[in-house]
Image (tube, rainbow, N blue to C red):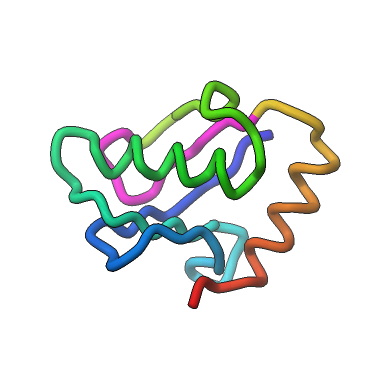
Amino acid sequence: MRLTVRVRPGASATAVGGSYGGGAVLVVRVAAPAVDGRATEAALVAIADAFGVPRRSVSLVHGATSHSKVVELSGDASRLSGRLLELLGDPPG
């Protein structure tokens, strides 16, 4: 399953949830700074945790240096889709 995420580096805590721009873009807040790929790697780890899959099941497809990224998740598509819907409706707080 491919999904678009919006990474917000430098957050006070890492959290996954909520939508960006009123659409199906998942917000990922990470404490890591946007330096040397640290925020991207932290976002991939946070996404894996939020979806309950191993880190190796999450790969970056596009957007290594952008706040908007496309990632590929491997696993049970129906379970991943259901979890995505939960996360999109659940802003971290």
Residue 78 on the magenta segment: no
Residue 72 on the magenta segment: yes
Residue 71 x, y percent position in the rendering: 52, 35
Picture layout, residue 59 above or below residue 89:
above
Q: Quadrant of residue 56?
A: top right
Magenta part of the chain? 64-73
Residue 27 x, y percent position in the rendering: 47, 60
Q: Which residue is nearer to you in this view: 7 or 92?
A: 92
Q: Residue furthest right?
A: 78
Residue 68 x, y percent position in the rendering: 38, 49
Picture layout, residue 28 above or below residue 19:
above
Q: Which residue is nearer to you in this view: 83 or 62?
A: 83
Residue ID at (59%, 28%):
54
Residue 45 x, y percent position in the rendering: 45, 38
Q: Residue furthest left?
A: 35
Residue ID at (24%, 38%):
38
